[in-house]
Image: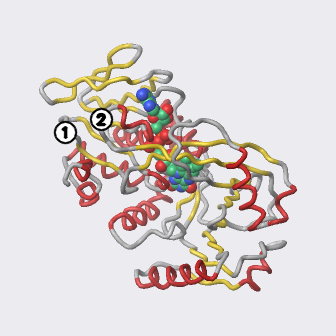
Amino acid sequence: MKGIIIGGGIIGLSIARELRKNGYEVTVIEIYRVGRGASWSAGGMLAPQSEGLNPGTFLDFCLESRDMYETFVRSIQRETEIDVGYWKCGILCPAFSEEEEEELKERIKRYADMGLEGKWIDRDTLEGFYNSLGKDIRGGALFPEDAQVDNRLLMVALEKYARSRGIQLLEFTEASEIIEENGRFVAVQTKKGIVEGDFCVITAGAWSDHFIKSHVFPIKGEMAAIDITKRDIDRVIFGSRAYLIPRKDYKRLVIGATEEMVGFADGNTVKGLMHLFRGLEDTLPYLINRNVQETWFGYRPATPDLLPVLGKTEIENLYIATGHYRNGILLAPITAKVMFELIDKGVESHYLKEFSINRFNNG
Ligand SMILES: Cc1cc2nc3c(=O)[nH]c(=O)nc-3n(C[C@H](O)[C@H](O)[C@H](O)COP(=O)(O)OP(=O)(O)OC[C@H]3O[C@@H](n4cnc5c(N)ncnc54)[C@H](O)[C@@H]3O)c2cc1C
């Protein structure tokens, strides 16, 4: 059986890996280089609790994926000999106002009822951890089970896995159209010719709407990175003004991220970068003297209800896995699992029912 994956981001490559491990022939069609879309731009936080997700199916989906992460990265590290910087560092959410403090304390309680860890740390205690703390910070909620991965290293590892295990990567190849016959998938038309397969998965991130009506649209995010040292910051700090992600080797602090519905509008703006650096200054002011390493931007694949689109489509043997919005790095392991079970065994988990593309057509 040969599967075709359109889009070589974390979702496409994770599904490709799962299929390949189980004996499928796999071809990935990627318009540029694999792994350089949103999956390269992301922060790599594995942060369902810090994101403040409400109890329900989506939170369950995220928590299950967070639980799978250590095993997921361990096996990729074994397969590729690349350390992908997974770090269960815990995430601190600072409160900049009374309302934020109330919300975070309430969130700690709500999650405790679900058996999830979290605790409030007051400002005096936080002052002992950092060189200086933004003047508005009143304290913060620590969620010790939230984690991070270096998403760029993970993409390099997934690419290495693909190349070393015989997954065909058709890079710099633009997929233009799905070819079907009698309601059944037969091939993908690319700008370089036709690629035939037994089934196809659309994993083209924010660009997925090009192929079928998936209701996915881009939400742009700008990011920056600066130099740090080990003494500067001990874990991810995720505030409403910015989030700060120290990489495990303490050589880089990733600062994120803006959110804008501006379509595909490439480039960093002065406004976007000012937002990030003000957020940094409001959180850990002593870091504004550091050198800037890089600035970049990316497009989150969002949907009208901000939930993913996963599963079958109206065309037989054409599947879709996209719309992961702010949590696609976190959701890669579970997405690969549920999509593989669907393709291989026809199993439709309750997650797939909830995240089906059909929800947009039913009313
Ligand atoms: C600034 C920012 C910060 C983020 N931070 C986090 C975070 O901390 N934690 C987290 O979990 N998530 C985060 N996300 C979200 C996460 O990055 C995405 O949800 C995830 O990367 C989506 O993966 P994907 O594989 O669907 O998309 P992508 O990585 O965008 O991959 C889609 C691929 O399809 C290719 N493609 C498009 N059109 C075609 C075509 N016609 N033919 C062939 N190929 C095509 C693209 O080139 C691309 O490589 C962030 C996103 C952004 C933008």
Q: How is the image coloured?
A: secondary structure
**Residue 51 percent location from the top left of the image:** 52, 66
Q: Residue furthest top?
A: 193
Residue visible at 70% across and 81% down? Answer: 138
Label 2 vs 1, first from the N-terminus: 2
For disc 1, does the CB lie below 8 Å from ligand 1?
Answer: no
- For label 2, the residue is 212
Element at badge 1?
A: loop
| Residue 314 - label | 1
Quadrant location of the C terminus?
Answer: bottom left
Residue visible at 20% across and 47% down? Answer: 345
- Is residue 166 visible to us here? no
Q: Horizontally, is 186 left or right of 67 in the view?
A: left
Answer above or below: position of 270 versus 199: below
Contact check, label 2 and label 1, Cβ < 8 Å: yes
Residue 170 figure quarter: top left
Closer-to-camera residue (307/237): 307
Answer above or below: position of 73 versus 318: below
